[in-house]
Image (cartoon, helix red, strand yellow):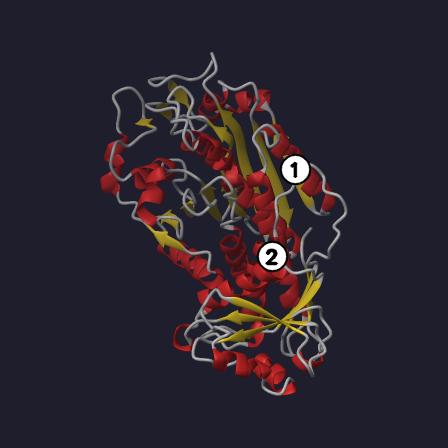
Amino acid sequence: MSLQFTFIEHAAETCTAACLVVGLFADGTLSPAAQRVDAAANGAIARLVASGDLSGKLGSTHTLFGLAGVHAARVLVVGLGEAAKFDAARYAKACGDAVRALRALPVDNAALYLSELEVLGKDSAWKLRAAILAADAQAYQYAATFKPRDKAKTPELATLALAAPKALDDSALTQAAAIARGVRFARELGNLPPNICTPAYLGEQARKLAAEHPGVHCEVLEEADLRRLGMGALLGVAQGSANAPRLIALEWKGGSADDKPYALVGKGVTFDSGGISIKPSAGMEEMKFDMCGAAGVLGAFLAAVELKLPLNLVCVVPAVENMPGSNAQRPSDVVTTMSGLTVEVLNTDAEGRLILCDALTYVQKYQPQVIIDVATLTGACVVALGKHASGLMTQDDTLADELLAAGNATLDRAWRLPLWEDYHSQLETGYADLANLGGKYAGAITAGCFLSRFTEGFRWAHLDIAGSAWDEGRKGSATGRPVPLLVQYLLDRAGN
């Protein structure tokens, strides 16, 4: 169940929500709402701070019950850390911490007053959106493959009201909620097991999205269609699996008929065993997340459509399963891509670039003004940047700046890596136009160089989300990144 968001209509001390959320800095300074609650309660919060029973440490939460003079039954005090260090990232963390604590309480509604806090360089609309995204991320709970639960005996958080100035209209709330839905959609696709989320299933979800949103056109190409188009690289990856491939194309025409579209392309490997170059067994269960690039562009497309952005948008997803079946491609096989270039497959586990290169050629039929591909492409990117930043590669400085700015604005950050000509020699081979592997060094960059060979003449950028797409571990979950970055980029292009 997704959270519903509204605006707060009352001052903190008179609000009748099941729980109020206020803030406390590490030096004992109360947030404005906390000051009002404290005054109404005759200094009860200040006394608890003075006695050491309440801490303003970042990440701490304390629930107070039955404060005299306060209409709400509960007050959740969230630690904000040092006031001098309180920035956009700490603000988003505090909002997320609040909802994590609220979920442990028997409440179905709450009022979050943290959005009234000052955040350097951020306006009220940004604070509202960041709070909603952080809150919804914490409220999300995967349940698709659990035994259905009995009706909850205790209330569960369903509605969150946020403090906002009266001058702020509903458009800020609408925008934030649409992005949150896009993130949630991407997370759910990413988290589904690979026996459910197959290439065919992704195609069905795309058709469903189109059916539910007027103005969206969907086309799902099957194996015979891909063969007619000459997508030898994509088909080569798919040929070892019993699950047939799909190529999904969604269109939204919110702009003028003669406006060139923006194009999003997402890697959709619904499970990646590595093929004949099989992966180690440890951690292989996480390879269901290898379609998070596809999930990310589908989520961004959904948010853009729900916002009815006044631009034209295309979303293309090559969807395959990479398995070591009896018909699987072998290291040293040579495939012919849709572009006509031939590729020697040195390693069948470098499959993402093989499906993307055909999808990047296919998307050019729409004559897009910009192409952005998103992929959990290389472990080398995780080594370089860890789990915090996505890797960004492009030869277009302006496009790089626009995407980096969108990432910084949404805290869905990326870091630019070079795509110098120097690296291209690592893709040379004596048996084809290029190899699908660049050797031991600079693996993320040589993968980007590979893709660049199929986007010549177009403004193009590549986002490697191998580190940022999911959290590791048995309870690790898809993050929904880079939906916020992509939607902000499109919002900026639309002038919103």
Residue 472, position as x, y percentages in the image: 45, 43
Q: Residue furthest front?
A: 51
Using the image as rendered, state which of residue 382 and residue 348 is in the foreground.
Answer: 382
In space, the residues marked 2 and 1 are separated at their CA atoms by: 21 Å
For badge 1, the amino acid type reads Phe
Looking at the rendered structure, the secondary structure element under dot 2 is helix
Using the image as rendered, state which of residue 271 and residue 396 is in the foreground.
Answer: 271
In this picture, residue 440 sits left or right of residue 356: left
Is residue 96 in view? yes
Characterize the local packing of mark 1: few (<14), some (14-19) or many (20 or more) Cα atoms within 10 angstroms.
few
**Number of numbered discs on residues:** 2
For badge 2, the amino acid type reads Asp
Q: Is residue 291 above or below residue 386?
A: above
Residue pictured at 60% horizontal, 80% vertical: 33
Q: In the rendered image, which residue does mark 1 sit on?
A: 146
Residue 159, position as x, y percentages in the image: 70, 62
Q: Which image quarter: residue 383?
A: top left
Residue pictured at 35% horizontal, 40% vertical: 448
Characterize the local packing of mark 2: few (<14), some (14-19) or many (20 or more) Cα atoms within 10 angstroms.
many
Using the image as rendered, state which of residue 106 and residue 120 is in the foreground.
Answer: 106
Residue 379, position as x, y percentages in the image: 36, 38
Residue pictured at 33% horizontal, 18% vertical: 332
Image marks 2 and 1: residues in contact by CB distance under 8 Å: no
Q: Which image quarter: residue 35?
A: bottom right
Q: In the rendered image, which residue does mark 2 sit on?
A: 136
Residue pictured at 46% horizontal, 22% vertical: 232
In the picture, the quarter occupied by the C terminus is bottom right
Residue depth check, mark 2 versus mark 1: number of the one nearer the observer: 1
Badge 2 or badge 1: first in the primary sequence:
2
Residue 88, position as x, y percentages in the image: 46, 68
In this picture, residue 69 sits left or right of residue 359: right
Looking at the rendered structure, the secondary structure element under dot 1 is loop
